[in-house]
Amino acid sequence: MTVEKSEVNLRLDLFLLQRMPKAISRSFVQRAIKEGKVTVNDVIRKPNYRVKFGDVVKISIPSNAQNISIEPEPIQIGVIYEDEDIIVVNKPAGMIVHPIPSHNSGTLVNALLYHCKDLKGIGGELRPGIVHRLDKDTSGVMVVAKNDFAHHNLSNQFKDRKVFKMYLALVSGKVEHLEGDIQISIARHPVLRTKMAASEIGRIAVTHYKVIKYFEHATLLMAFPKTGRTHQIRVHMKCINHPILGDKLYGKGSGASRQMLHATKLGFYHPRTHEWIEFIAPLPEDFKETIWLISSGV
């Protein structure tokens, strides 16, 4: 696609958003740019690049991405709290948060659309209500916006790092220090595009941790991500040679049935009342069972 005079000086992501079908969200476009799937005159550019008259912009996306149909599905979800503005849920491990071209059924969004009848379109067609994510095999607490007002407010809180996030992680080996900060920048892996990796040219990422208990070959700890990078805790634990048990992407995948990472507490300011509120998601049974097996030396 070629930039017209009326489009000169638009940000690259906004230019693409205007040109792409309505089903394609801004976050999808931004992710495509960051993953190097967008070029301007055959050169990879950043989302904030200002397009010029005559620029030739190319984007590589799955052919079926614009044809995703998101339908409400009667999937049971663990609701922790709900009011007119927000719904807080306990996402189970194994559930994808929002539809993707290869997986448009059985997601948290499908379940939410059934539970919240007026959620469709809030913040985007493909990710209605979603202001943050958990990886597929990470369980735990999530907040979802039920209207545009709440979506805008919560998105800004996450962006401005006003949200408190606490995870429980079961990692391999004995972490040397009882408490510490991991500050390692993260970027998309240069070869394996589904992975993230430590990178000097990546975005700054900070995780604080506190050890709860040592086992013979593992450590149970609390992790407090100060930033919100993709796979942040998983990458950081790998970087200090203590990958999360069961994490097949960043570890050996052994020692557990899935990655032992659980978002246990989430705190933020209520978008309407501005009151500070916190929510806790109970530890799932598979996590408890893995702790028992490790503590028993099985």
Image (tube, rainbow, N blue to C red):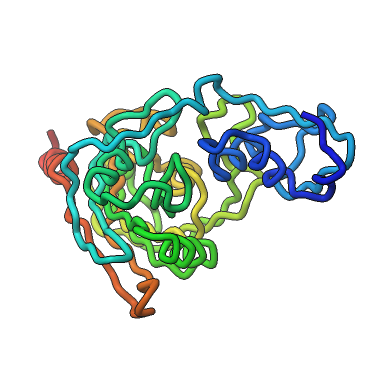
The image shows residue 283 at horizontal and vertical percentages of 18, 51
Q: Given the current orientation, which residue lies at the most extreme top position?
A: 63
Check the image and report above or below for 180 versus 7: below
Instruction: Decide which of 256, 204 is in the foreground and name it.
Output: 204
Query: How many dots with numbers?
Result: 0
Residue closest to the eye, 277 or 164: 277
Residue at image point 40% right, 43% down: 242
Residue drawn at 64 percent across, 39 percent down: 34
User: Is the residue 208 above or below the residue 185 in the image?
Assistant: below
Quarter of the image where the C terminus is located: top left
User: Which residue occupies the foreground of this view, 55 or 91?
Assistant: 55
Q: At 59% from the left edge and 25% from the top edge, which residue is drawn?
A: 61
Q: Which is more toward the observer, 7 or 63? A: 7
Q: Quadrant of residue 38?
A: top right
**Spot occupied by residue 219 in the image (x, y as percentages of width and height):** 29, 49
Specify the quadrant that holds the N terminus: top right
In the rendered structure, the answer to whether residue 179 lies left or right of residue 65 reads left
In this orientation, does residue 54 appear? yes
Left or right: 136 in relation to 203: left
Place of residue 208 in the rendered image (x, y in percent of width and height, measured from the top left): 44, 61
Looking at the image, can residue 240 be seen? no
Q: Which residue is depicted at the point 34% across and 60% down?
A: 166
Q: Position of residue 272 (x, y in %)?
A: 37, 75
> Does residue 70 appear to the left or right of 49 in the view shown?
left
